[in-house]
Amino acid sequence: MFTQLLVNGLVTGSVYAIAAVGISLVYGILRLVNFAYGDMMTFGAFAGYFANATLGLPMIASAVFAMVAGAVLSVALDVVLWRPLRLRRAGFMGLFLASIGVALVLRQAILLVWGPQPRAYDVDPFKVYVIGDVRLSLAQVATIVAAAAAILVIGLFLARTTTGRVMRAMSDDRALAQVSGIDVDRVVVVTWIISGVAAGLAGVLAALVQSSFDPNFGFQLLLPVFAAVVLGGIGSAYGALAGGLVLGVATELSTWEGFGGGVDPVYKPVVAFVVLIVALLLRPQGLFGHARTV
Amino acid sequence: MSVLTSGEFWAFVGVVAGIYTLFTLGLQVQFGLAGLLNFGQVGFMAIGAYTMAILVAKEGWSMWVATPVAIAAAALAGVLVGLPTLRLRGDYFAIVTIAFSEIVRWVATNENGLTGGAQGTINLAGQGTAAQYNGQWERFQRWVGAQLHVGDKDVVMLILVWTAALLLVWLTARLARTPWGRVLRAIREDEDATASLGKHVLAYRLQALALGAALAGLAGCVYAWQFSFFSPDDYQPLITFFGWMILILGGVGRVWAVPVGALVFGFLFAATRFFDFAPFSYLDSADRAYVRLMLIGLVIILLVVFRPQGLLGRRDEMVLE
């Protein structure tokens, strides 16, 4: 039972981690807490649904389609909204509120196009792999594999490529990065592309794992993902990855009987926040944040 | 468009705007005065409403005792939330407060024995008995109506809500000009400088958070009386966002802008429900609801882009240095 819960936690945590990186990178570069991210994940899931169910593409191609759609949406939003707001020097409040507005518009648009009924991808929900005493659905295996690949790619990108280093430099000290001659506009576009791809991927994976999804499901994922971002330290990409995995595992393991009888599963979402609040009491800047910026 | 000429409709819009005035006044104290990004205001509203309803319907308390206790409970919740989290940076605080309001809603949905669960207050006294918490309020409303020679229940409610709202707006505006209000604004502008003058920054922030939470608790009680029934679904984070929209619409830092913003919002929100002309007439009622929320989202975005200072506010409140 313990190993099963641990593996389930890794699956949930992988989805949180990918989404948390998407939010954290944008915060690091643009100081924007993107409240529309949950609905961007929903958009990704429905773009994947369009490719999978309407166009009849296989699941992997549909996931790629969703990632591209997520990137297009997030660059488009930068052009029509975030860039003008930056030019108008909007403060934290203004950006946060605008992202709430985007979240509302996006979700209602998805509801208008696809309706409120739950949807599911065209995959076999009954195919199960058994490894020892752990049972994994096809969707869970796909999620772990895809998430491991995504985490590796993002990690290598940030650590090894010039663009990745520039992004980390900008999120550490924006002014210093600018005077070093960094092309800020290019970095911003790259950031939005990565964030959008992550939204598309996280949306499809989350939809696969819970097997059916509706236009509200991304928003319901948003709060634990935010918890992961804060736990890791806002703006730290590595922190977001770690925060996502820690929260995913912690929420699933909290229901284990060996853990004082286990928490009632309906309270799983609350566990994420209790973990977050306790962690913030001990380390107000998050696991990977810098103390001076708090 | 006949609905727009009915007095009942306008009384309803006015009552909703009055409740939002109380709710947003709390945000004005927290953000306009103290600079706190509380995005969990609806959680305090829920605590006020549920405390009042539970004490009256289950414990048999008098409404006149239960309501102050409910408001105090909301304020206490503000202190409890603030103690561990107010040391955090603003953006962390914003996210943690949203989380708090979702936890409140989650608990209200799942603790059937305490709150009646997802079915709401009708289930407060357990299955099979329809619980009621507003008998005493309705008697009070009829009594006020008789004193004022006003027969219409909605109009009496309108008078009561706005009397309370305007009184509290006036008190808050007075409070903003006291030394206490000045210290709060000083903390908002420069925390370190204020601390160096020997002011206990955390204590002042806690007081602002608790006061704002108490106002939300009162808004919750009034909301409960107006609609005679509520369920956890009435306390979605969306309500908090509406409050912030009203705050920005009116103007941050201007206490008297809150009722103005609430009236404009109340009209936008309630009136769009009755749009029955083209292109709205092509949509069915569910789609129309989506379009309404979409329009509200668009209004929020356009406000932030084109008029971040709101109708009556100062621009420098919303723009980076």
Image (cartoon, grey):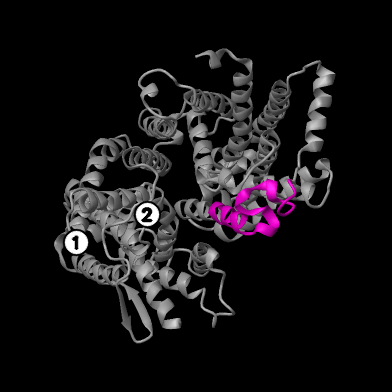
| Quadrant occupied by the C terminus of chain B | top left
* Image mark 1: chain: A
Q: Nearer the viewer, residue A133 or A266?
A: A133
Give the magenta-colored segment's residue range.
B101-130
* SS assignment for the magenta stretch, majority: helix
Q: Is residue A254 above or below residue B268?
A: below
* Image mark 2: chain: A
In reply to whether residue B74 is colored magenta, the answer given is no
Q: Say the numbered circle drawn on residue A60.
A: 1
Task: Give the crowd class for mark 2: few <14, some 14-19, many >=20 residues within 10 Å.
Answer: many
Q: Nearer the viewer, residue B174 or B159?
A: B159
SS under mark 1: helix
Q: Is residue A206 above or below residue A34?
A: below
Chain-order first, disc 1 or disc 2? 1
Q: Is residue B12 above or below residue B26?
A: above
Q: Nearer the viewer, residue B192 or B58?
A: B58
Examine the image and state in which quarter residue B255 appears.
Answer: top right
Relative image position of residue A63 (x, y in whole percent): 22, 58
Judge whether residue B6 can be spotted in this image.
yes
- Which amino acid, by three-letter code, is at mark 2? Phe
Q: Is residue B93 above or below residue A153?
A: above
At x 41% / y 42%, what residue is drawn? A100
SS under mark 2: loop
Name the residue carrying label 2: A213
Left/right of residue B194 with respect to residue B316 in the rendered view: right
